[in-house]
């Protein structure tokens, strides 16, 4: 079942009960993520592929809008059109595909074109063909996978998670990414704390964030795009240690992770979440 979630969070089922609004059988754009092959001439002939870069995705989704009267049709037409047009001012919406077993994958999307009206239609029905631009060509799960641990707490993520000294929280765990491609986690550090050092041993990459936090204060670290922000959402320039820090990804499969929170206290909490990403819907 296709669903459009507009930038305000309202859901529009594109196969609604009653058949007033439903998807036609001419959908395209939900297969393997498009790529750009970077090449250079080979002196022996042909080319050598020196890189592969994933590209944006374009979804083409024809829908039928109906009404029992012209005004009923016109009202529905305008409402749904506005739900897609919101992306021009308020950022991307979510295009979600829910399967019969209850699982779902989704992709961030902007309305690009297609809500124009077809010749000979427009009285009690019309068949616009939506074109949606998806900046990230990969699909993702509709729910993120979380990790969380606080000072003095013992237990598992997927493996035992040890801690503790008087001023540090020291973590070592294995994080499993069930997706088909890399995932980009978002971290949150709740104070008290003075520093976070996070290492992905699978990749051999580390980042360090220096920020003094009191109890009740927190920061978020978004790895894509790279950004450190305070609890109000304002960017904290200079918090990420440079040079030497790489806001790392999670590879598909098992990732060995270590992190240390310096200056910790009883209320210190560290959490991470990510959306697994996939080639197809």
Image (tube, helix red, strand yellow):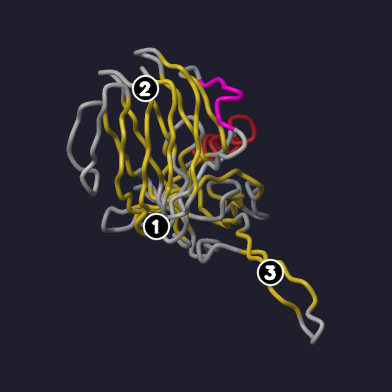
On screen, residue 88 above or below 116: above
Of the 4 image quadrants, the one containing the C terminus is bottom left
Crowd band around label 3 with a 10 angstrom C-alpha radius: few (<14), some (14–19), many (20+): few
Dot 1 falls on a residue whose secondary structure is loop
Residue 264, percent from left and from top: 33, 21
Residue 191 highlighted magenta (yes or no) = no
Query: Which of these two is toward me, 194 or 62?
Result: 194
**Counting residues from the N terminus, which is met first, the one under dot 3 or under dot 1?**
3
Asked if residue 10 lies left or right of residue 160, the reply is right
In the structure shown, which secondary structural element does the residue marked by tag 2 occupy?
A: strand
Residue 134 percent location from the top left of the image: 58, 50
Q: Indicate whether 245 appears above or below 17.
A: above
Q: Residues within 10 Å of mark 2 (few under 14, many from 20)?
A: many
Which numbered marker is on residue 249?
none
Image quarter of residue 13: top left
Instruction: Tell me if I can see residue 66 in this picture.
Output: no
Q: CA distance from mark 3 to mark 1?
A: 25 Å
Which is more N-terminal, label 2 or label 1? 1
Expressed as whole percent of the image width and height from the top left, the position of residue 219 reads 45, 23
Would you name the residue on which mark 3 appears? 50
Return the residue nearer the eye: 200 or 7: 200
Q: Are marks 2 and 3 in contact (CB under 8 Å)?
A: no
Which residue is denoted by mark 2 in the rendering? 190
Q: Identify the magenta region.
A: 233-241
**234 part of magenta stretch:** yes
Q: Is residue 42 left or right of residue 239?
A: right
Q: Nearer the viewer, residue 144 or 79?
A: 144
Residue 151 in sight here:
yes
Q: Residue furthest bottom?
A: 44
Label 1 sits on residue:
179
């Amino acid at each position: 079942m296709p669903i459009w979630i507009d930038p305000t969070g309202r859901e529009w089922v594109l196969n609604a009960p009653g058949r007033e609004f439903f998807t036609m059988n001419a959908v395209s754009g939900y297969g393997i993520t498009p790529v750009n092959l970077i090449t250079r001439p080979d002196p022996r002939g042909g080319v050598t592929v020196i890189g592969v870069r994933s590209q944006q995705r374009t979804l083409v989704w024809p829908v039928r809008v109906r009404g029992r009267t012209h005004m009923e049709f016109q009202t529905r037409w305008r409402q749904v059109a506005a739900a897609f047009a919101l992306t021009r001012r308020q950022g991307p919406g979510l295009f979600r595909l829910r399967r019969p077993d209850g699982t779902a994958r989704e992709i961030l999307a902007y309305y690009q074109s297609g809500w124009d009206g077809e010749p000979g239609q427009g009285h009690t029905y019309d068949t616009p063909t939506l074109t949606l631009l998806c900046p990230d060509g990969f699909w993702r799960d509709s729910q993120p996978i979380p990790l969380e641990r606080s000072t003095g707490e013992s237990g598992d993520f997927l493996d035992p998670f040890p801690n503790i000294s008087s001023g540090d929280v020291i973590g070592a765990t294995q994080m499993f990414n069930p997706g088909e491609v890399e995932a980009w986690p978002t971290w949150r550090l709740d104070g008290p704390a003075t520093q976070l050092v996070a290492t992905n041993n699978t990749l051999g990459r580390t980042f360090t964030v220096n920020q003094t936090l009191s109890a009740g204060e927190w920061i978020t670290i978004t790895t894509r795009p790279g950004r450190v922000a305070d609890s109000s959402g304002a960017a904290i320039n200079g918090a990420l240690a440079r040079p030497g820090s790489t806001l790392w990804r999670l590879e598909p499969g098992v990732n060995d992770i270590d992190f240390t929170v310096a200056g910790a206290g009883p209320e210190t909490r560290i959490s991470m979440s990510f959306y697994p990403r996939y080639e197809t819907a």
